[in-house]
Image (cartoon, grey):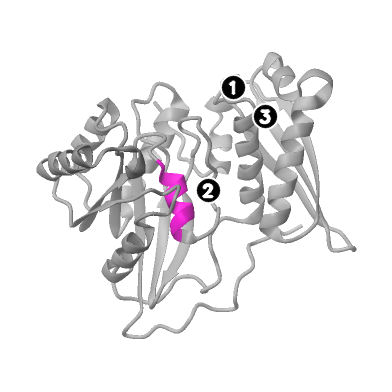
Amino acid sequence: MPEPEPPRSPEPPPASSATRCGFVALIGAPNVGKSTLINALVGTKISIVTPKVQTTRTLIRGIACEGAAQLVLVDTPGIFAPRRRLDRAMVGTAWGSAQDADMVALLIDARKGLGEEDEAILHGFADVRSPVKVLVLNKVDLAAKPTLLALAQTLAERARFAATFMVSALSGDGIDDLKKWLAAHVPPGPWLYPEDQISDAPLRQLAAEITREKLYLRLHQELPYQSTVETEAWKDLPDGSVRIEQTIYVERDSQRKIVLGKGGRTIKAIGTAARAEIAAAIEQSVHLFLFVKVREGWGDDPERYRQIGLEFPRA
């Protein structure tokens, strides 16, 4: 059965001399708020958000329109010192998206200031080819004004930014100004997507990401990173509802038992939360069936990397 795609108009709006369109990559250390910012700019949730660091594994693209401009916003994995093969794939994907984008926005957690990971990112940031670089200080509602000003000044001395914005992605403060500025500075050109499309991810992937978010939120400290969710089946039913079958893959049987929980209570709670959000996202009734299976060594399987959109690191 063909993979379902997000609803879309037949064609993007016709290009004119006034239209603008460009890719904007958001990069930063883990948990600086990239996914929350993408969701705020798009105006709806398209990227999962959890307190667990390095939740975003692959590129999630959100699409936002502002006047005659279309922004293709790229939510990248957090950049950190990689230790495992999966880590290296995530970090490589983040830097690669920055190199390919028309604009790059560097996010810094204003509450925490500059940490070791931010320092390492600043060092690599100098090699990014993007013609337009923007600084975004996030979580400004949690930092004192003198601290913010000092942080902005320090960063301005470390790298050349076309503009600096102070925002709270969670509350929405400063988001409109950032969106308008980005819209005015992406390159002239035709739109790449229909006006009503909010992401380029297929519904199967979005549904799997929603379930993965609920998994992390439920098992924050207990669940290892070597787990993933795959949508195995998607069937539209005659009554207008949809049957979705997903498998949660872990690496050891002990992890499988954690996901299932005593008497299956944990997996039931995850399924209930995921089903409600998937149904709201696709505007259909959902029958969600979750399975938990052991897949040993999936973190070293090139095919698994391909399925989640990452390049397999050979070394």
Q: Is residue 38 magenta?
A: yes
- Foreground residue among 97 and 260: 260
- Mark 3 vs 2, N-terminal side: 2
Which kind of residue does numbered mark 1 sit on? Gly
Residue at image mark 2 = 47
Marks 1 and 2 sit apart, C-alpha to C-alpha, by 26 Å
In the image, 158: left or right of 166?
left
Rendering coords of residue 275 (x, y %): 74, 46
In which quadrant of the rendered image does the N terminus lie? Answer: bottom right
Which quarter of the figure has residue 21? bottom left
Residue 3 seen:
no
- Mark 1 vs 2, N-terminal side: 2
The structure residue drawn at horizontal position 30% and vertical position 31%, both measured from the top left corner, is 112
- Mark 1 vs 3, N-terminal side: 3
Find residue 297 and name its label. 1
Q: Nearer the observer, disc 1 or disc 3?
A: 3
Asked which secondary structure carries label 3, the reply is strand
Which kind of residue does numbered mark 2 sit on? Ser
Residue at image mark 3 = 249
Marks 3 and 2 sit apart, C-alpha to C-alpha, by 21 Å
- Which residues, given as a range, are shown in magenta? 33-41
Q: Nearer the observer, disc 3 or disc 2?
A: 2
Residue 127 seen:
yes
In the image, 134: left or right of 21?
left
